[in-house]
Structures are given as C-alpha cells and as structure tokens.
Image (spheres, rainbow, N blue to C red):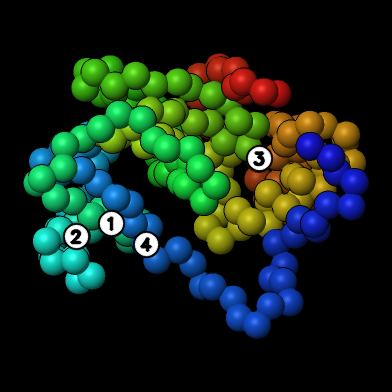
Amino acid sequence: MSDENPAPVTSERPDAPFHTSGTDHITVWGSNEEDTLAFYRDLLGMPLVLRQPNLDDPSQTHLFFDTGDGRILTVFVSDERASTRGQRINTGAVHHLCFSVEPDEYEDIMAALEEAGKGYNVFDRGIFHSIYTQDNNGLVIELSADKYEIPDGRKGEVLATAQRLREEDGADFAQDRHMEGALEALGLPVNKHDLPDADAGVGV
C-alpha cells in the first residue's frame, strides 16, 4: 500500500452534503430460518427481536437480531433454501461481518466454536484482536475484541491518531506502540486487555 498522496485519515467529519449518524442495521441473504437461528441466536447469542415477512417479497421471512448494543443484523430467509458453503467473491460483495466481543470471553468463545464444530483462526490485527469463523452459509464472521480500553465515542479519534503515528513511524500497519501512543497523546489511560498471542495474519 502506498502512502503517497493518500486520502486524509481523520476523525473530523468531511465536507459532505450530509452525514450519517451511525449504523442502523445490515441485511444479508440467508438460507433457512432453522440454520440461521442455530448460528446467530444459539451460537453467537444474538436475541431474535423481530420476525416478519420481507416487505419486498412476502414469500421470504425477515429475521431481526440484536447484535448486542441495540444495532441490528437482519437476515432474509426461506425454508426452501438450504445452507450452502462458500461465498462468491465479486466487486461489491460482502467480504465479512464483524461483531464485538468482550476480551475476557475469548477462551469461552473458542471453546464454544470448537464444540459447535466450527473452524476458526485467531489473529492479532494490531489495533484489535480477532477470531474468524464462518456462518451456516460460508459468510466470514469476525469476532473482534479491542486490545485496549477505549471510551465510548472515542474509537475514531484514537484510530486516526494511531494512523498519524504509524505514518510518522513508517510502519506497514498500526501496532501496539501506535495505539498506546495514540491513547497517551489524547490523554486517555493505556489499559491493555489480556489476549492470547497470535500472528498478524497472511500478507503483512
């Protein structure tokens, strides 16, 4: 990745005709209700908070899950569709979904995935720590824990500061020293969670 003349990285809102106020929900194409509930509700622990017809196509059911902070994941399902393996990789396709988990639940999460027969990988991504697995249709699911305590509403500011320190350092990606430096520069306490050692992953 080249840092020559890149788009500026900043937590400041851009000069745009309007600004979004947050993520309301994400919707994915699912298979059937039974397999979808087994993964998102029974394994990941997301409450099913609403079930109704897909208003664009009433032959399908629209399931609404609370991802843990009131933000919603919805899935279109039909009992006529079987779960499949593997996702098509095309421009505009979804690469993966990421959900936050608590750092102190990491070992329990890995044990639960193993018990459910789900393969997974664990990576230290520098700014956070991630477990990667797949849902019942092969969609990559990331379960991410912050490596450092970051106050609510400050994550964008911390990441943008870590980016500036990374660039000044000439590093390929943001690492612990950049995150710690960002927290210190912003006058925030540096409290690192106890997470397992892991590789950064392929490609870096």
| Residue, disc 2 | 62
Of the image marks 1 and 4, the number of the one nearer the N terminus? 4
Badge 3 vs badge 2, beta-carbon distance below 8 Å? no
- Label of residue 132 in the image: none
Q: Is residue 33 above or below residue 129?
A: below
Q: Tell me the number on the disc at residue 190.
A: 3
In the rendering, which numbered label is found on residue 25?
A: 4
The structure residue drawn at horizontal position 89% and vertical position 41%, both measured from the top left corner, is 168
Q: Nearer the viewer, mark 4 or mark 2?
A: 2
As shown in the figure, which amino acid type bears the numbered disc 4? His
Which residue occupies 84% across, 40% down?
Answer: 2
Mark-to-mark CA distance, 4 and 3 = 31 Å
Disc 2 or 1, which lies upstream in sequence?
2
Badge 1 element = strand
Which quadrant does the C terminus fall into?
top right
The alpha-carbon separation of the residues under discs 1 and 4 comes to 7 Å
- Classed neighbour count for the residue bearing mark 4: other residues with Cα under 10 Å, few (<14), some (14–19), many (≥20): some
Disc on res. 74: 1
| Secondary element at tag 2 | strand
Q: Nearer the viewer, mark 3 or mark 2?
A: 2
